[in-house]
Amino acid sequence: MIISRLAALAAGVAAALAPIAAEAQTQAQPGEAAFRAMFKEMIETDTSAASGDCTVLANKIAARMQAAGFPAKNLKVMVPDGAPKAGNLVAWLPGKDPKAKAVLMLGHIDVVNAFRADWTRDPFALVEENGQFYGRGVSDMKSQDAIWADNMVRYNAEGYHPRRTIRMALTCGEEGGGFVNGADWLAQNHRELVDAGIGLTEGGGGDLDAEGKRLAVTVMAAEKVFSVFTLEITGPGGHSSKPRNDNIIEALGQALANLKTLSFPTQLNENSRLYFETLATRADPETAAAIRKVLADPADPAANAVLDRSVSYHAMLRTTCIPTLVEGGHATNAQPQRAKATINCRTLPGASVDEAEAAIVKAVHNPLMKVTRGLVGAARAPSPPITPELVAPIRKVAATIFPGVPVTPMQETFGTDAGRLVAVGIPVYGFSALFRGDDAGNIHGLNEHISVQSVMDARSFMYRLIKDYADAK
């Protein structure tokens, strides 16, 4: 029943009304200078757990919003007890109908750490170059955060009075690393500040092919689940001048090499199937043919080989596990006594973490290697259904800004804070209107980037979309 309804929605988009001419983006949008200034300040304020401070940025955004006329009484910087650097900013624009459920704009302001020596440019400076923004957080997810705060300022300046209250929560801790997770903290302790009938956060948005063609506008309907394992092996060590045959760093290296053979089967669910059915009508001929074969037979090896060229398609179709950290040894002139690696897995919705652990143990193939399960993401509550009330406004705005590009549900390859709010009954979906290529702007990696055009298009899109939700009957 759900599948047929989702399919009907996706099909309806493909047969949308004749495209309206896309808006010219060569001229600056209203308030663009102020938006760019806010975005710049967000990027240039370090909010990584290793060296940054979310509270500092929350206060800066609040000050900027107040300077633009947003009432201080509708802004709060919320800091969890014992976590002075894990501040969150909440804001609200009161609606005319107190009985109507609010619309929530949710985003995290913390970022993954970045080492300046490794980057081509300073990661904590916003650089615009060759049509791209560069800097830690430009794609994940400070561009969307800046759009959310910009929306609130623009709506207030216009004297806009929505039917539904519009709420914004810019939170800390989504990336982990030691910060308190602000979305969870607010949901558990200050629900009234984030309660809503519909919420949007990161995830989804839009996909570009290698030539920059827009393939689909995507709405996140499901997420993968995060889990961590460690591989550890110990030995007696000794002087480096008298090598042993059982060097444990070599043993760990072999175990990691064995993990390269680890491959989980291709599995489609209702959301990934709808996504690939949509892409089959838009992708290049070779990719489209491979998609159709995988839709008919998920185990088709030749078709999977074609789709696996895309890191996004590969991750969307199966559980994945990769090494992310390695440590070992204690001195340059000593044989190692301990070597350890961290394995990060992303399991498909509904997949068993036990099965992932068993697959790691089998692939490592070394009884002396201790495999320990660490942090496992909470089992996520079922994602809220993709309804016409969610999709119709997205379709309407997309027809103007991205004419002819279909809208489709999809399963994201990562996890978001949506699950924290869904768990307490607040329906939150992943949608950003930000178009990205296969590497998603190298999120979490070196020289993170996103196209200037993508950010400006998303700003225009989200300004309209949130109004449509807020004025809905």
Image: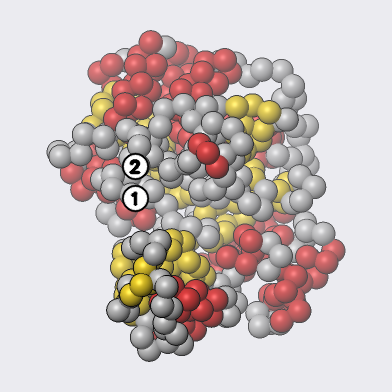
* Pick the front one: 395 or 186: 186
Circle 1 Cα neighbour tier, 10 Å, few/some/many (<14 / 14–19 / ≥20): some
Q: Above or below — where is 119 with respect to 220?
A: above
At 64% across and 43% down in the image, what residue appears?
435
Q: Which mark is residue 49?
A: 2
Q: Which quadrant of the figure has residue 131? A: top right
At 38% across and 48% down in the image, what residue appears?
175
At 55% across and 42% down in the image, what residue appears?
118
The amino acid beneath tag 2 is Ala
Q: Residue 78 at what x, y percent from top left?
A: 23, 32
**Label 2 SS:** loop
**Label 1 SS:** loop
Q: Which mark is residue 72?
A: none
At 26% across and 45% down in the image, what residue appears?
180
Q: Residue 105 at what x, y percent from top left?
A: 41, 37
Q: Residue furthest right?
A: 285
Circle 2 Cα neighbour tier, 10 Å, few/some/many (<14 / 14–19 / ≥20): many
Q: Does residue 189 appear left or right of residue 374 in this picture?
A: left
Q: Residue 329 at what x, y percent from top left?
A: 37, 66
The answer to whether one can see residue 227 in this image is: no
The amino acid beneath tag 1 is Gly
Q: Which residue is mark 1?
A: 176
Q: Above or below — where is 220 with respect to 292?
A: above
Question: Could you tell me how far apart the alpha carbons at marks 2 and 1 are, in whole angstroms?
Answer: 8 Å
* Pick the front one: 161 or 30: 30
The answer to whether one can see residue 17 in this image is: yes
